[in-house]
Image (cartoon, helix red, strand yellow):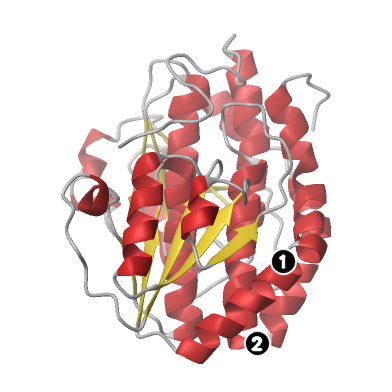
Amino acid sequence: MPNHTSQMHREICEIPHAVDRLLTGGLPAIKDAAAAVRALDPALGITIARGSSDHVCTYLKYCAELLLGLPVCSVGPSVASIYKAPLRLDRSVSIAVSQSGQSPDIVEMARAARRDGALSVALTNNPDSPLGAVSAHTIDIQAGPERSVAATKTFVSSAVAGLLLLAEWRQDSDLLAAIHNLPDALDAATRCDWPEVRAAISPGRSLFTLGRGPVWAISNEAALKFKETCQIHAESYSSAEVLHGPVSIVDEGFPVLCFAAGDAAESSVTEIADQLADKGARVFVTSGKAQKATAIAHQRTGHPLADPLCLIVSFYAMVEQVSLSLGIDPDAPRHLRKVTETT
């Protein structure tokens, strides 16, 4: 990556080190939580989060469903914080994700889930926070201080912590090996340059991000970061949905960024990428399987569930450069602050 001076850039470069810290300092708490969940053998999982943390939860939802066969749904925090509605959560596990652990609605929903019978787990960068206090198990994601408003290393550390929880729960040796090799893979991902994507992006023009399965969560996070750091309107869709209506706004040169991991969905994502390229869009995809879309550099991990983590790191490196090229400070997006507290 070029030598920029933004805090966001520095924090992206710190991601491999933060993950390495998590894999050592965070492992005892993760193993403890995994043992408790394994003993419970839940029939349902719920997630509680907002913003980038909710994208972490979307990623973990797919991972849990594919790895464990556990159905997982997202519960809106307002169910508890505003509507005060109890839920039937016996023999369930709840996973709440929050960088700060301070947002009142997230805390209240986590507290209510535990009251209503769920085994509650919190992933947070602040284990002494109110969220940690109301949860049965609190996992410190070990990201260290994150000063840029845009979440990068806390997103990745939260996702790795959650994935490691699932791998320890299932005691999946292949996935555990891939996770413990992540620091090197993520370091390589920071150096995957996407100049062709940067050249296709212009202010005032919308774009699509696409993915499928666990990688759809990465597409969602990418669309948010385009808005947050570049003031560019981006919409995320599953590649299975984009042809059902959204494709109507695609015209000549319309930018589309497709995220594909080395999993069973890779071919379907690249097929849609090629169809959109046929319609005149400028389509980029993190796969070598496309025939008409442009393949871009990507780092694989040896396990399809871990691949999305490298993709988001490469994206972060790219979007920070786009922000700077537009004269926007990626560390201080307008109208935003680091901790958003909703009730």
Q: Earlier in the sequence, mark 2 or mark 1?
A: 2
Mark 1, other Cα within 10 Å: few <14 / some 14–19 / many ≥20 = many
* Residue receiving disc 2: 171
Image quarter of the N terminus: top right
Determine whether the residue tagged by mark 1 lies in a helix, strand or loop. loop
Task: Tell me what residue is drawn at x 83 percent, y 24 percent.
Answer: 3
Looking at the image, residue 342 sits to the left or right of residue 15; the answer is left
- Looking at numbered disc 2 in the image, what kind of residue is underneath it? Gln
Please state the horizontal and vertical placement of residue 238, each as a whole percent of the image: 35, 55
Please state the horizontal and vertical placement of residue 208, each as a whole percent of the image: 38, 39
Label 2 vs label 1: CA separation?
18 Å
- Name which quarter of the figure residue 48 lies in: bottom left
Looking at the image, residue 325 sits to the left or right of residue 113; the answer is right
* Residue receiving disc 1: 301
- Residue 188 or residue 127, whichever sits in front: 127
Compared to residue 295, the image places residue 170 above or below, namely: below
Task: Tell me what residue is drawn at x 21 percent, y 53 percent.
Answer: 79
- Looking at numbered disc 1 in the image, what kind of residue is underneath it? Thr
Determine whether the residue tagged by mark 2 lies in a helix, strand or loop. loop
Question: Disc 2 vs disc 1: which is toward the camera?
Answer: 2
Please state the horizontal and vertical placement of residue 127, each as a whole percent of the image: 62, 51
Task: Tell me what residue is drawn at x 65 percent, y 87 percent.
Answer: 171
- Residue 116 or residue 169, whichever sits in front: 116
